[in-house]
Structures are given as structure tokens and as C-alpha cells.
Amino acid sequence: MRKIILITIVLLAAASSALAMSTSDCFDCHSDDTLTKAVRGNEISLYIDEGIYGESLHGDLDCTDCHEDLAAAEDEHEEELKPVQCSNCHEDAADIMEAAEHPADCSDCHGKHDILPQSDSRSSVYDLNVPGTCCTCHSDQETLDVCVQYESGMHGIVLIRSGMIFSAVCNDCHGSHDIRGASDPASLVARANINDTCAACHQGVVDKYKESVHGEIFADSPEDAPVCTSCHSPHDTERAMDDTFLLTVVNRCSSCHEEMGYTFSKNYHGQVTGMGYTRAAQCPDCHGAHDILPTDDPASMAHPDNLVATCGKCHTGANRNFTLYMPHADYHDPQNYPMLYFVYLAMVILLTGTFAFFGIHTLLWLIRASIEKSRNRSGGAH
């Protein structure tokens, strides 16, 4: 009797397996490239390329492994299927995504039936393809089109135009599954974390920054110090030697050092820069870029002992007297620069008085000349 029951169970199991929908059954319909369905007025293709599916990471899985609600289907199935639960196999990634609250489905980034390893150049998450994948959602959806900015920035140029996959792409800065907004303290692009994020590629530069006056301030109070993105645009990152960057670097520094920016704009360097020339000294030429130190630090480029060398980079033959020039002196400030203020005031009075005197003199001369000319005409008439 027991043997009969066991045989019955085996036969029922075999029969059930035989009746279940197989992957081959699925392709009987979905290999038809004309198969579609209407979704909110749009025709959506239900075609699945069997060859591409076979080459995908999931090619050795059955359709019902993901579409679980088809497990009991024998032939035809409901038009609407339940969402695929990738978390059944990829629990860790799903948990990270859920915590980050990035409003995207797994298939938005990885595809559906054509999922390939990240290392495969055909994969939607291959480095060269990541910007295009992200931009299917992030293009033209924001006031500043980050996709256009990325393409015109150094990272985009190196990746897209030069094909160098070591350049930063979206997930290098924003993460892959743990994508969070910049206002989230746990985000890779949060103010407190952005320097370390950049350091993943620019370690040497960030090390210099940490030793600088900005780095020291950041260590005590991240909100009060500039970070990488304070000076370098995050998406349309300029090349530091390009004119676009050189002509705007003073404005970037001035966003924090407003008074220094004003006094710079009044000196020769600032005037030349303001006219669109890049050969005049900018802030980094005198203070450094990532290694800015206080002027009383003996290692600072702007320390009095180093000024001859610093000025000498542009002014060949510069000596100690040359360095007495005060690039940020304000001739409107009598308290800090009394000599400069009174010389400026004297020059203004001298020039104004000179022009006023000769202006009045010229006017009186013209009046006198007109009167004499009129008298001469009257005498000639008699």
C-alpha cells in the first residue's frame, strides 16, 4: 500500500511538472517580434530576443524563476503580471536600494531580459554606458541639465570623447545602489563626504587639501570650509588650465573671500583679468591651489620669505623691493593703508584741480576770443 502511495505522488509531481509553463513555452509567444500590448494608449513590445536572453546573466534561469506568478500557469496567463522581485536573489542590493530611497527599479538600470555583467561593454552599467543609462531619467528633468553639463565637463570629455573608462561616471560619485540626495548625511556627495568621494580618484590632491588651511578648517567644521565642489563644478568640471576656469577662479575664491576679491579687482592683476586676459596672476598663482597655507606659515607661497620666488615665477628678476608691492592694498581704507590713502587723495585733488583750472581757463579764453572776434567784425564794418 505504501508503495502505491509513493508511486502516485511521484506520478502527480511528474504530471505537475509537465503541465507547468516552461521557458520554451514562453518563447512560443514572446519570440514573435509583432507581439505587443497597449499600456496607457501606447503599444509596448512584448518581444524577447531568445539569443540575447540566452547570453544574459539570467540565461540559464527559467522565466518562472523571476515571474513567479506564472509557476502555476499551464499555457496562457493573465495580461498583467506581478512585479519581479529581484530581492529574492539579490537581497543585499535590494536592502541598500530601499534604504537609499532612490526612485528607480532594478530594470531601469540593469535592463530586463538582457542583463549582462558590468564588465561587458554591452551592459547598461558598463562604465562607458552609465551616463546614458542614468540620463534616461535625469536628462531635462532639472533646471540645470546635469547630463549636458557632464558631457561638456572634463569627466565627460575624457569618457565620451576619448573613450577612457577610468574617468568618473555617475556611480563613482553618487554610488550604485546607495544613491542618496546631497542633503542626506550618508550620501557620497554630502558636503561632509564629498572630499573623500573625490579622493577615490584624486587622492594626492585631497591629501594636499587636508594639509592646507582649508583642510584644517574642514576638519573642525565642515560647514565652514570649502570642499572640492566649492571650487570645481560637480558636473561640468572645467580643466584647471582652461581660460573658462582661469577667468572665473577669482569669483570662486571671492564667494568666501569677498574683500580680497574686491581689492584684487582694483589692482593691475585684477584689471587685466577683468579685461579677459589670463596671463595676469590669479589667486592660485600667489597662494597655491590645493595646498593653500596661512601667510605666516614658512611653507606658504605668500610668506614674506617666499615672495621673491613666488613673484619671480612671472616677474623675472624680482627682488625684495619688488615684493613690497601690496596686491590687496585698498586705497579707500585710511586705517589700514594711511599712506596709500593720502597719496590717492592727493592725486585725486591734484588731477581734479588741474583739470578744473585748465577747464575754466580754456572756457574763459574761448569767451574772450569770441568777444574780440565780434569786436573786430564790428570795426571792419565801419
Image (spheres, rainbow, N blue to C red):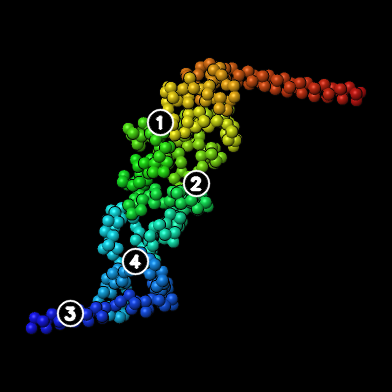
Find the distance from the CA under tag 1 to the CA under tag 2.
25 Å
**SS category of the residue bearing label 1:** loop
Q: Read off the residue under disc 4.
A: 58
Q: Is residue 80 above or below residue 99?
A: below
| Eye-nearest disc, 3 or 1 | 3
Report whether residue 262 is seen. Answer: no
Q: Position of residue 260 (x, y in %)?
A: 48, 29
Q: Earlier in the sequence, mark 1 or mark 2?
A: 2
The quarter of the picture where residue 343 lies is: top right
Q: Read off the residue under disc 1.
A: 212
Q: Read off the residue under disc 3.
A: 10
**SS category of the residue bearing label 2:** helix
Q: Position of residue 215 (x, y in %)?
A: 38, 33
Find the distance from the CA under tag 2 to the CA under tag 3.
65 Å
Find the distance from the CA under tag 4 to the CA under tag 3.
29 Å
| Eye-nearest disc, 4 or 1 | 4
Q: Which residue is drawn at 42% across and 26% down?
A: 294
| Eye-nearest disc, 2 or 3 | 3
Find the distance from the CA under tag 4 to the CA under tag 1.
50 Å
Find the distance from the CA under tag 3 to the CA under tag 1.
75 Å
Query: Type of residue at label 2?
Result: Met
Query: Type of residue at label 1?
Result: Ser
* Left or right of 86 in this view: 243: right
Q: Which of marks 4 and 1 is nearer the N terminus?
A: 4
